[in-house]
Image (tube, rainbow, N blue to C red):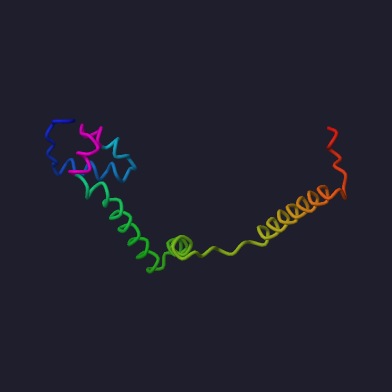
Amino acid sequence: MPGVHHKPTPELRELVKKLVVHGSSQEEMADRLGICVETLVTHYKVEVYFHLVDVNCKIEDKMYEKALSGDINAMKFWLTHRAGWAPAKSQEDKEKDQRAKNFDDFITQRKNEMSQGKVKDENANL
């Protein structure tokens, strides 16, 4: 670590890229290479800070190409995650949402009535 000279190799650069993609912290990467974090950042700045961006861009490009080629799942994914689109809810889901809203409204109304003394709290003496 301190005082030890480190020389990056193509193999070590590839290892750092893999560790970045798999979510390793800088501390974990440095430990794996037998160096300190400062040395890691000094010698592998591009891999540490930019490789994940490059990988994400490549994956986004593939998803984009699949969507444009007619892949329905890719289209749905793109529209949902990139365009803010949400599929329409089923009638059953709409009814569940309405029941939940009605229940929330009932609870709110009941709390207001109790706080105003209009309704006695049946559970107060429990």
Magenta highlight range:
30-43
Residue 35 in the magenta stretch? The answer is: yes
* Picture coordinates of residue 58, whole percent (x, y): 30, 58
Q: Quadrant of the C terminus?
A: top right
Q: Quadrant of residue 90?
A: bottom right
Left-right relation of 98 to 61? right
Majority secondary structure in the magenta region: helix
Q: Is residue 29 left or right of residue 78?
A: left
Say which residue appears at 20% left-offset and 34% top-offset. 35
- Residue at figure coordinates x 13%, y 30% from the top left: 3
Residue closest to the eye, 50 or 112: 112
Q: Position of residue 124 (x, y in %)?
A: 84, 37
Residue 88 in the magenta stretch? The answer is: no
Q: Quadrant of residue 123?
A: top right
Q: Is residue 67 left or right of residue 80?
A: left
Residue 89 point in image, percent of width and height: 61, 62
The one nearer the camera, 88 or 71, is: 88
Q: Residue at x 25, y 37 (%)?
A: 37
- 68 versus 22 height, above or below: below
